[in-house]
Image: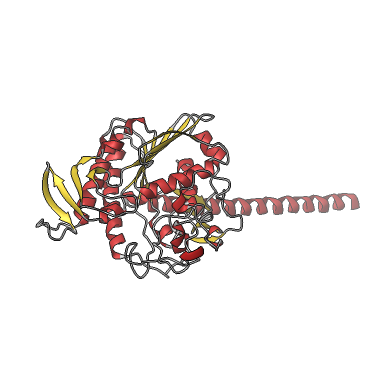
């Protein structure tokens, strides 16, 4: 009898244990289902939110983060103890005016910053990976001297893996081409500061003998005749459009910008800038050749207390923080035109299978007043008897190495994410 009772008790204990385990499993399954449902609803909400963005937002490249997506061009400059990829001793292609180290710039703090998007990490440029991605391709930069500045930065970084051989240059060394034989990569810079046909009366120091003449209905064939050879193109307008100019359409004068004494109607640079960008982007979107295109926004300068030819200077040694500087009215006007014309191009490009990306360098450049050559555009400007000499500043271009190196981080991340 005791054995029977003992067996019944053990059976009840076993049954109770099984029941408890079953109940716990049931509760855990219910909790897991609830988490899954919550995540699904959140994911659906995020997807709808992204789809409601404007065409400009949709074409700005993004990196994944813990919060989902992030805008690569919204962020801040943060300290970077690793420093630059190269120096003036390890890169041969730095132009004299941007070779701040060689020219005697005494501070080095401007070298130890990197661009950090707000909600994600931006990997540093990988020259080996970039060359591998670009094997057998042609990459061209079309525009003004800021484009040339960017190309020199890229050349310096790539040279740490493979050095390009120069295979072409024009008489003034403004348009140039390099070839990387190991990776069969062709890298070009095409000098076309207005993008449209232009007659320029200016020397290498920026001194003009007459007003520039722009034919707004004719693109500059310096770049259009080469366009079909490019697999990737980085193209931009820029500050040249702020110079005094007379505008032509159908070979007739239609107006001018800043041309007193010529008895020509003042129409403002905005008219010509929009025409030039509109024609350029129409050409690219309508071309049968579908080159992967980066459209770069203009970069602000940092002249203080004057312009380049009126004693303006830039002697800051660190970045601006968010809220410490506002974009100037003239730069905001240019940017508005750029974004509007870019959005038009995106709409057309999406219909014809063209990849066109906004390369938005405006605000990240705005926060780096410390990255320009300033007086160190010249070699040892205060040496010897030059100690008290007034020296022209360059507060538009970038020291190499310098902040413009981060543009390559952004460009590569866009290509990788695409």
Count every numbered label the image shows and give the total.
Answer: 0
Residue 74 picture quarter: bottom left
* Picture layout, residue 317 above or below residue 265: below
Q: Quadrant of the C terminus?
A: top left
Q: Is residue 413 visible?
A: no
Q: Position of residue 397 (x, y in %)?
A: 41, 55
Residue 120 lies left or right of residue 27; in this view the side is left
* Picture layout, residue 306 above or below residue 60: below
Q: Position of residue 160 (x, y in %)?
A: 57, 41
Q: Nearer the viewer, residue 125 or 290?
A: 125
Q: How is the image coloured?
A: secondary structure
Q: Is residue 334 visible?
A: yes
* Picture layout, residue 162 above or below residue 100: above
What residue occupies the far right of the structure in this picture? Answer: 2
Residue 169 picture quarter: top left
Q: Nearer the viewer, residue 4 or 236?
A: 236
Instruction: Report the residue at 63% width, 53% height from top.
Output: 28
Residue 175 lies left or right of residue 371; in this view the side is left
Q: Position of residue 295 (x, y in %)?
A: 35, 46
Q: Position of residue 178 (x, y in %)?
A: 45, 35
């Amino acid at each position: 009898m005791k054995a029977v009772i003992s067996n019944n008790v053990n059976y009840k204990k076993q049954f109770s244990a099984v029941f408890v385990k079953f109940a716990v499993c049931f509760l855990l399954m219910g909790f897991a289902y609830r988490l899954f449902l919550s995540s699904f609803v959140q994911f659906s909400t995020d997807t709808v939110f992204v789809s409601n963005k404007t065409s400009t937002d949709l074409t700005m490249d993004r990196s994944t983060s813990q919060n989902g997506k992030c805008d690569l061009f919204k962020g801040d400059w943060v300290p970077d103890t690793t420093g630059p990829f190269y120096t003036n001793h390890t890169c041969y292609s730095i132009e004299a005016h941007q070779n701040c180290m060689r020219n005697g710039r005494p501070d080095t703090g401007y070298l130890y910053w990197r661009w950090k998007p707000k909600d994600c990490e931006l990997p540093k440029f990988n020259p080996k990976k970039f060359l591998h991605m670009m094997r057998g391709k042609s990459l061209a930069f079309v525009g003004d001297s800021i484009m040339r500045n960017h190309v020199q930065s890229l050349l310096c970084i790539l040279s740490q893996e493979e050095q390009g051989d120069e295979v072409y240059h024009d008489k003034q060394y403004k348009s140039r081409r390099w070839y990387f034989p190991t990776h069969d990569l062709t890298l070009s810079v095409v000098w076309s500061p207005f993008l449209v046909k232009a007659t320029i009366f200016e020397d290498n120091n920026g001194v003009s003998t007459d007003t520039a003449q722009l034919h707004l209905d004719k693109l500059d064939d310096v770049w259009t005749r080469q366009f079909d050879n490019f697999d990737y193109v980085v193209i931009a307008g820029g500050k040249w459009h702020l110079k005094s100019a007379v505008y032509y359409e159908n070979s007739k004068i239609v107006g001018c910008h800043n041309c007193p004494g010529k008895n020509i109607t003042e129409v403002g640079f905005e008219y010509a800038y929009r025409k030039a960008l509109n024609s350029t982007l129409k050409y690219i979107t309508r071309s049968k050749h579908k080159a992967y295109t980066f459209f770069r926004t203009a970069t602000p300068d940092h002249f203080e207390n004057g312009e380049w030819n009126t004693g303006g200077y830039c002697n800051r040694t660190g970045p601006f923080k968010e809220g410490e500087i506002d974009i100037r009215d003239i730069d905001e006007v240019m940017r508005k035109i750029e974004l509007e014309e870019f959005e038009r191009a995106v709409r057309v490009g999406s219909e014809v299978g063209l990849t066109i990306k906004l390369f938005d360098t405006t605000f990240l450049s705005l926060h780096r007043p410390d990255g320009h050559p300033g007086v160190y555009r010249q070699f040892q400007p205060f040496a010897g008897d030059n100690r008290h000499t007034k020296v022209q500043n360059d507060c538009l271009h970038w020291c190499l190495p310098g902040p413009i190196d981060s543009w390559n981080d952004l460009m590569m991340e866009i290509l990788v994410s695409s």
